[in-house]
């Protein structure tokens, strides 16, 4: 009877692992329902081949353009308020949509798909919109931090901003589901920790001490792995309100401007 019970438990556990493996992209990429088109004064919605969608607010002459990669529970339209903040600070803003999200919802999301969309949008920013590479600043929030790190690893950007970043999604999965072999099941790893030592641009990391999604120690660890990183821990802040204080946003804007 003991052998039979153990066998049943093992089979159920294997089925659970199989279910998690098959449904993981619904967990990793929980795109919000509906499609909303961003409408930001002074910004243009671009449809690039792919299709890839981007929101562009041009920079004043000689100013940097911040390329933003949003979190996994957002879509391009949710970046509108950030576009306005960067415009008011005299910076350009360029946000990229992910496959499987918002206007690009017809496509399936994946790690490589997000990287491909990001790289296509960066190429368009440089070649078609005329933004020099030395004036590109990368910024990633939550899920987008992994996209921003990969683009920095590929040589894009002269500065890097990471908001509530993770060491890797496999690490996050292992924390959230310690009873599952998360590192073996993950298809989309976004291993920023492994890439960090090769990213030599200045990095600013912002992380709330009460982050309930990505533990704050992951942001702290990344700060030790990038060669030139500044980590700012925000006391009492959670995962989605890191930029709610004006002085935090002002510090981010100064870093992006190179001041």
Image (cartoon, grey):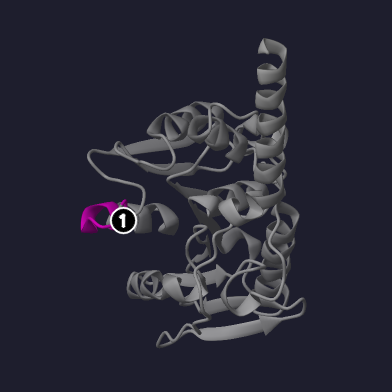
- Comparing 81 with 58, the one in front is 81
Farthest residue, direction top: 2
Pinpoint residue 132: horizontal percent, then vertical percent: 63, 67
**Which quadrant of the rendered structure holds the N terminus?**
top right
Pinpoint residue 194: horizontal percent, then vertical percent: 66, 31
Pinpoint residue 191: horizontal percent, then vertical percent: 65, 38
Q: Which residue is mark 1?
A: 243
Pinpoint residue 129: horizontal percent, then vertical percent: 65, 79
> Residue 234 is drawn in which quadrant?
top left
Residue at the image point whose x is 48% and y is 43% from the top: 165
Magenta span includes 35: no
Q: Which stretch appears magenta?
A: 242-249
- Comparing 7 with 122, the one in front is 7
* Crowding at mark 1 (Cα within 10 Å: few <14, some 14-19, many 20+): some
Residue at the image point whose x is 67% and y is 32% from the top: 12
Q: How many marks?
A: 1
Residue at the image point whose x is 65% and y is 53% from the top: 25
Residue at the image point whose x is 36% and y is 59% from the top: 253
Q: Is residue 60 left or right of residue 133?
A: left
Position of residue 17 relative to residue 9, above or below, is: below
Q: Is residue 46 left or right of residue 176?
A: right
- Comparing 107 with 12, the one in front is 12
């Amino acid at each position: 009877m003991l052998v039979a019970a153990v066998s049943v438990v093992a089979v159920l556990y294997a089925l659970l692992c199989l279910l998690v493996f098959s449904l993981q992209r619904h967990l990793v990429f929980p795109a919000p329902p509906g499609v909303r088109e961003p409408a930001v004064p002074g910004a243009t919605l671009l449809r690039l081949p792919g299709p890839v969608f981007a929101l562009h607010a041009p920079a004043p002459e000689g100013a940097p353009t911040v390329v933003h990669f949003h979190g996994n529970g957002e879509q391009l339209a949710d970046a509108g308020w950030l576009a306005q903040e960067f415009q008011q600070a005299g910076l350009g803003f360029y946000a990229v949509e992910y496959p499987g999200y918002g206007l690009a919802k017809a496509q399936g999301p994946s790690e490589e798909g997000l990287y491909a969309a990001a790289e296509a949008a960066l190429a368009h920013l440089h070649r078609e919109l005329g933004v020099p590479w030395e004036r590109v600043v990368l910024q990633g929030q939550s899920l987008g931090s992994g996209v921003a790190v990969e683009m920095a690893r590929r040589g894009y950007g002269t500065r890097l901003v990471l908001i509530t970043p993770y060491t890797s999604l496999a690490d996050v999965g292992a924390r959230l589901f310690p009873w599952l072999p998360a590192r073996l099941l993950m298809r989309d790893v976004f291993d920023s920790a492994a890439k960090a030592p090769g990213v030599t641009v200045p990095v600013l990391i912002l992380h709330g001490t009460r982050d309930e999604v990505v533990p704050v120690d992951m942001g702290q660890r990344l700060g030790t792995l990038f060669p030139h990183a500044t980590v700012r821990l925000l006391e009492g802040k959670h995962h989605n309100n890191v930029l709610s204080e004006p002085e935090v946003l002002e510090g981010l804007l100064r870093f992006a401007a190179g001041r």
